[in-house]
Amino acid sequence: MPWLDELVALSLDDAHARFHRMQALWFAVMDRIAPHIHVTSHRVSPSQRARGAPVHPRTRRFAPTRAEAAEVREALSGAIARPWTLGDFAEMVHLSTKQLSRVFVDAYGKTPLAYLTMLRVEEMARLLRETDLTIEQAGRQVGWHSRNRASDAFRQATGMTPSRYRRLRITKEQRSS
């Protein structure tokens, strides 16, 4: 606890002058915390997605993006509402579905369909913030034909329901008025 108090006090003063002391304190705190942090290379709960989210750079191979992955990403970005399948992408770039998934994950850290879901959630969030469309209308506009599917995907990606997300916007607008 005294380390944290000193670290906070130093951060309020001239942090640049005491950088090395702050760094030493931070490492001391992390040495105490690190043994209690557990990271697994496999799923520990059914809600975790296998490689659905970007992986930490230490486990990711950095290489030039293959043209096939970039072509699929461009197609996804250009038509997020289209009912894409992995077979559509594979046919487009003349790769097997497994090879395409591997190439895409290596380039972007997500499978093509997980990447599509991310794009849809981002666009749906924008629509909920900037328009008065209903949740169902916003979901349909980004490519989901079911309000439940749109809500589930949105909640899984953001941690909150679309209606709660929209209420946050309304609350912020009321505060600024």
Image: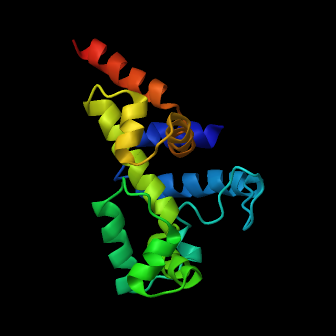
- Left or right: where does residue 116 sit relative to residue 39? left
Q: Is residue 65 among what the camera can see? A: no
Which quarter of the rendered picture does the N terminus lie within? top right
Q: Residue at x 43, y 32 (%)?
A: 136
Which quarter of the rendered picture does the C terminus lie within? top left
Q: Is 1 placed above or below 15 here?
A: above
Q: Residue at x 28, y 25 (%)?
A: 132
Number of callouts = 0
Place of residue 89 in the rendered image (x, y in percent of width and height, measured from the top left)? 44, 74
Q: Quadrant of residue 59?
A: bottom right
Place of residue 48 in the rendered image (x, y in percent of width and height, measured from the top left)? 68, 54
Q: Quadrant of residue 91?
A: bottom left
Q: Residue at x 57, y 43 (%)?
A: 156
Q: Residue at x 70, y 49 (%)?
A: 47
Place of residue 117 in the rendered image (x, y in percent of width and height, measured from the top left)? 47, 54
Q: Is residue 177 among what the camera can see? A: yes
Nearer to the camera, 52 or 62: 52
Q: Is 145 placed above or below 48 here?
A: above
Nearer to the camera, 108 or 33: 108
